[in-house]
Image (cartoon, helix red, strand yellow):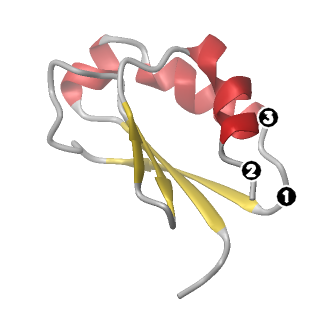
Amino acid sequence: MSSERTILVCQGRCCRKDGSKQILTAFESQTPPDVQITPCGCLGQCGNGPNIVILPEKNLYQRVSAKDVSVLFLTNQN
């Protein structure tokens, strides 16, 4: 298993409606070199979005906003 951190940003219909495209853009603009940002399909948590998952830890974050992006990077550092 790769030790590289990956952030999955849901791009399902409900999450997009709630701003996940802006969250994806915010992550892409602040990405450290060792983090991969990946848009993904529905994470199965519709109604709680926008949702992201940070791998390899499998941390699920719900109701994320673009302003949360920098805090999430700080919270999930090794």
Residues at marks 3 and 1 touching, judged by CB atoms closer than 8 Å: no
Residue furthest out toward the bottom:
1
The residue type indicated by label 2 comes to Gln
The residue type indicated by label 1 comes to Pro
- Identify which residue is drawn at 64% across, 12% down: 67
Between the residue at mark 3 and the residue at mark 1, the CA separation in whole angstroms equals 10 Å
Q: Position of residue 35 (x, y in %)?
A: 71, 57
- Please tell me how crowded label 1 is: few (under 14), some (14-19), or many (20+) other residues with Cα within 10 Å: few
Q: Give left or right: position of 57 versus 78.
A: left
Quadrant containing the C terminus is: bottom right
Numbered label attached to residue 30: 3
Residue 61, placed above or below residue 60: above
Q: Give left or right: position of 74 versus 33.
A: left
- Please tell me how crowded label 2 is: few (under 14), some (14-19), or many (20+) other residues with Cα within 10 Å: few
The residue beneath circle 2 is: 77
| Residue depth check, mark 2 versus mark 1: number of the one nearer the observer | 2
Between the residue at mark 2 and the residue at mark 1, the CA separation in whole angstroms equals 13 Å
In what element is the residue under mark 1? loop
- Identify which residue is drawn at 33% across, 11% down: 18
The residue beneath circle 1 is: 33
The residue type indicated by label 3 comes to Gln
Q: Position of residue 2 (x, y in %)?
A: 60, 83
